Amino acid sequence: MTKPKTFDEYSAGFPAETQSILETIRATVKQAVPEAEEVISYDMPTFKLGGKNLIYFAAWKKHIGFYPLSEKVSSAVPELSMYKGTKDSVHFPLNKPLPLELISRMTLARREEIE
């Protein structure tokens, strides 16, 4: 399997429904922080800001992982407790609507932390 070098290459490896979800997250992050640079890092779609990783996201079998979270992001977005995840991620189930406003707020909180 070839490692993806672009978002489109990454997305192409998933079913159409998952591709649509990934594209929606991509658009939401771009709208929140239009100056962020889109790259692939750790084989995942990533946005960078000022040379630092803003967020990563990845598709899994049953969820979308949204990374990285930090204490500042977690405290700025208390609704994260409604979702499963790890210390540095939140998992959005593929069978539920995406919380786009929440994704935008997390992205903006992460931008604030970087700046």
Image (spheres, rainbow, N blue to C red):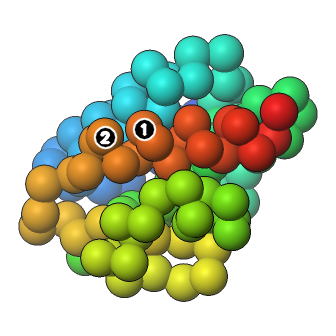
Task: Please name whichever residue, 12 or 74, is drawn nearer the observer in this view of the structure.
Answer: 74
Residue 103 placement (x, y as % from top left): 40, 46
Residue 85 placement (x, y as % from top left): 45, 81
Quadrant into which the N terminus falls? bottom right
CB under 8 Å between discs 1 and 2: yes
Residue 55 sits above or below residue 34 on the image:
below
Specify the farthest residue to the right.
51
Task: Please name whichever residue, 18 or 87, is drawn nearer the observer in this view of the structure.
Answer: 87
- Residue 11 seen anywhere in this rendered image of the structure: no
User: Measuring 57% from the left and 65% from the top, which residue is drawn there?
Assistant: 75
Residue with the mark numbered 2: 101
Which amino acid type corresponds to the residue marked 2 in the rendered image?
Answer: Glu
User: Measuring 81% from the left and 41% from the top, which residue is drawn there?
Assistant: 114
Task: Please name whichever residue, 55 or 75, is drawn nearer the observer in this view of the structure.
Answer: 75
Q: Compute the Cα span from label 1 to label 2.
A: 5 Å
Q: Residues within 10 Å of mark 1 (few under 14, many from 20)?
A: some
Residue with the mark numbered 1: 104
Q: Taking 89 as reference, is 53 left or right?
A: right
Residue 27 placement (x, y as % from top left): 38, 27
Which amino acid type corresponds to the residue marked 1 in the rendered image?
Answer: Ser
Q: Taking 4 as reference, is 22 left or right?
A: left
User: Measuring 12% from the left and 63% from the top, which residue is drawn there?
Assistant: 96
Residue 84 placement (x, y as % from top left): 37, 82
Image quadrant assignment for residue 100: top left
